[in-house]
Amino acid sequence: MTTVAAYAAPSAKAPLERTTIERREPGEFDVLIDIKFAGICHSDIHQAREGWGEAIFPMVPGHEIAGVVAAVGSGVTRFAVGDRVGVGCMVDSCRECENCKAGQEQYCIKGNVPTYNGIGTDGRPTYGGYAQTVVVDENYVVRIPDALPLDVAAPLLCAGITLYSPLKRFGAGPGKKVAVVGLGGLGHMGVKIAHALGAEVTVLSQSLRKKDDGLKLGADHYYATSDPKTFEELAGTFDLIVSTVSAPLDFGAYLSLLKTEGTLANVGAPEEPISLNLFSLIGGGKTLAGSMIGGIAETQEMLDFCAEHGLGAQIEVIRADQINEAYERVLASDVRYRFVIDTATI
Ligand SMILES: [Zn+2]
Ligand SMILES: [Zn+2]
């Protein structure tokens, strides 16, 4: 075991503080990563505060990890010391179920091992990226292309893949009208990626407050959903709508914005169940879908795509001692569009 510095929540009620954790020595197929940057995802806050149910403490959050390989096990073939790499939301899975075999490790039937707030295959709690190092099996590590700086690449490991996967799966591309609901950490990557895929992109945001940003990020149109006229004007417009919103939405109203056989894909995770009149689906043969991050191979594809198109996240780099303040600012939607921790400051 090696002792490394980290930032951890000691309990659900307490702020995060500097501490030390133990990392395992790299095993035969492990990669030891010197973490350079870790993004702050909204789900870090949900979990550190037990918003999604009972959690494991102390908790070192962070599943948007970018760093450099510092050592490899004797059996590692895909990475070498000095490689620029990333780790996202999972660090292992069963590798045997039909989903794992199909490269859909995020939907592992036996449950994958989350990067933090989980139990690793060694029976010990997993700790995430708000730390100086992490040790991960090479099959759950991805390569960050040289064209992407590590700081703007970090948020791609969760926010980027969360949007890339449904945009690809549901055919965002030339000739398609795509709407992104919500312009936050997830939504801003959705706009960039959908635009780079060649779609005509519309942002549907509560207000027009971030309209200039949205257009600069690549949106062709920007509408306020607080204005009822938006729903009249855009009825039947979109091939695909991706909702990034975690608050309960009027899904029926958004379904009315789809063309016949259009898809509303939801990546947000509202805590409450929704109510829906199914006529809003039946009438136009529409699909209401869900999507959660992406598999390891698709995450690599996303990073390569982002490098090719020069797409990084819009970030604000912070010191580790600003994490608690950053959490409050995320909750107040006061970030454009992702906080990234410089882990050298831990
Ligand atoms: Zn995340
Ligand atoms: Zn599996």
Image (cartoon, grey):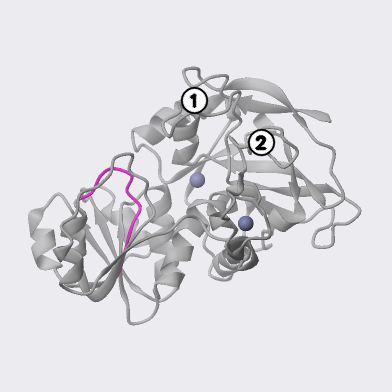
- Residue matched to label 2: 126
Q: Position of residue 283 (x, y in %)?
A: 15, 72
Q: Residue at x 47, y 64 (%)?
A: 164
What SS does tag 1 mark? helix
Q: Say what amino acid the circle numbered 1 marks.
A: Asn
- Dominant SS of magenta comes to loop
Tell me how many marks there are.
2
Seen in the picture, residue 105 relative to 27 is either above or below; the reply is: below
Q: Residue at x 67, y 54 (%)?
A: 94
Instruction: Quarter of the image for the C terminus: give it.
Output: top right
Decide if residue 264 is in sight here: yes
- Residue 341's tag is none
- Residue 324's tag is 1
- Inspect the magenta stretch and tell me whether residue 271 lies in it: no
State which quadrant residue 5 falls in: top right
Q: Earlier in the sequence, mark 1 or mark 2?
A: 2
State which quadrant residue 251 falls in: bottom left
Q: Position of residue 66 (x, y in %)?
A: 65, 48
Q: Quadrant of ligand 2?
A: bottom right
Decide if residue 256 is in sight here: no
Q: Position of residue 271 (x, y in %)?
A: 33, 39
Q: Residue furthest bottom?
A: 175
What SS does tag 2 mark? loop
Q: Seen in the image, is 213 located left or right of residue 186?
A: left
Mark 2 closeness class: few <14, some 14–19, many ≥20 residues within 10 Å: many
- Inspect the magenta stretch and tell me whether residue 245 lies in it: yes
State which quadrant residue 8 falls in: top right
- Identify the magenta region: 240-249
Instruction: Quarter of the image for the N terminus: give it.
Output: top right
Disc 1/disc 2 C-alpha distance (Å): 21 Å
